[in-house]
Image (cartoon, rainbow, N blue to C red):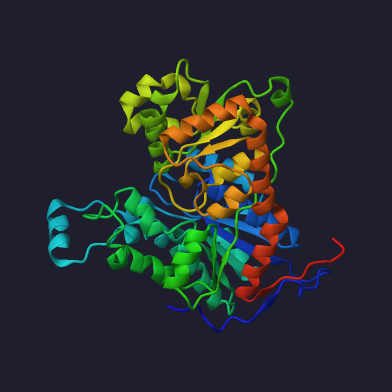
Amino acid sequence: MTPSSDKKAIDLASEDPVGGPVPVALIVGMPWFRSGTANVMQSQVKYFKDLGLRTIFACVPRFTEDFSTPSRITNLYRLAGDLEADEVHFADCLPHKVFPEVSLRQKLMDRLFRKRDNALETAFKLAAHSEIPPQLKRNLRNESFHVIIVNHVYAMPFALRIVNFLRKQGKSVPVVSVTHDVQTLILLDNNLIRGVSNEETLEELDELETELEFLGHSDALIHVGDFDQQFFGRKLPGIPQTTVYPFVAPIPLPPLAHERNGDDGFIFVGTAHIANVKAMEWFFVNVWPLLDGTPPKIRIFGGVSAEFNRLFPDLYARHRSLFNGKVDDLATIYAGATAVLAPMVSGRGISVKTIEAAATGKPIVGMPHAFRGISRDIVEDCGIEIANNAVEFAQLMKRALADPQPMAVASRKLHERLFQHEAFTDAMDGAMASAGVLVHRDPQK
């Protein structure tokens, strides 16, 4: 499917700033706050606000528990404040209508006579059945929307509902999808596709066909890493595509970093994502035994703690003292650390945690997967040495403790080369232009 061709180019500088309608950018995404995805969405909000647009974030459920209780929604509203959008709306969704209770007989009949949803179609169901909330409908009727940014293909069914609503108002708005990985591969990684455990049959999977079909509704695609650009560039050659590396501002560290000279050893920061869990398993099984004598101080933060305990309770029990759970003030955590561990052995797309580590100027001890989505030549040209196995990883840990300064310089070089604000805005300008959204900037600013 190709993008609609009836959309005319929209000039973000064409509105009369005095008395005319204020252009609006609608950003659609999942409730994955304080994560790599959230960092990307926050950068999108800032980008459009810097251009003078009003920003609205529409949040779509991915799992039935996302909007399950009023207290949960209240907490999500609080977390959504981190995005700094001008307005936030949560889609109206009643999970019991999406997944109604059915009898055992009906389940058997469905299996015998109906085509079952593939894993991606099942993942789409909540978004597909989510209604546009009343206030957002009023916004769509009365305001001048210039672009819709859709984060993750999971949100596309809801975004298409918005597109159809706007069409009924006689409005045609460009849709730009941000892929955030090949989601079919993510489902494979999480063993969510029946009867398939590897990538060998990827091209034959119904899930991939579904993913490409929905992304095909886009006027342009944005990828946050090199692999996605190459993959979707082959699969959807008729749609303009741009790699936009995430922008992460340099993270200033509190004075603690200088007072203690980084004597708190190593840190690992990760969500409950399966790639983080596998990284911890690999580290404890393969690297930990190589750390001679008394192991260095290691602290682990984030949702990975609970998920690691769930999947590897014995390993977790053995190393429980290293796990610290979720924290709000990551700057202070980074401040006391000598270096950042990135023992990634799996995962898709670019690693925002690696970019954040580079933004602090801390040494990064990482495996190749920690730098996924980035050219290895660029990483090594910045002076970062990548560990290829457990022995090299342990050696780099020792080097980081003995002489962290050269590794810290290399981290800063990587951040300055790829993840500064200017590089992000230039790439976003190009992506917008490819979708027919023309950006004009004041050269004096």
Q: Which residue is at a point 41% across and 43% down the rendered structure image?
A: 345
Q: Foreground: 47 or 434?
A: 434
Quarter of the rendering occupied by the N terminus: bottom left
> Looking at the image, which residue sits at the far bottom?
6
Q: Foreground: 408 or 41?
A: 408
- Left or right, 373 with respect to 185, comes to right
Tell me if residue 324 can be seen.
yes
Q: Position of residue 135 (x, y in %)?
A: 58, 59
Q: Foreground: 50 or 339?
A: 339
Q: Position of residue 78 (x, y in %)?
A: 59, 41
Residue 267, picture quadrant: top right
Q: Which residue is at a point 41% across and 32% down the rendered structure image?
A: 283
Image vertical order of residue 117 relative to residue 346, above or below: below
Residue 182, picture quadrant: bottom left
Image vertical order of residue 323 relative to residue 68, above or below: above
Q: Foreground: 413 or 253?
A: 413
Q: Position of residue 349 (x, y in %)?
A: 48, 53
Residue 145, picture quadrant: bottom right
Tell me if residue 307 can be seen.
no
Quarter of the rendering occupied by the C terminus: bottom right
Q: Which residue is at a point 41% across and 29% down the rendered structure image?
A: 287
> Looking at the image, which residue sits at the far right?
444
Counting labels gives: 0
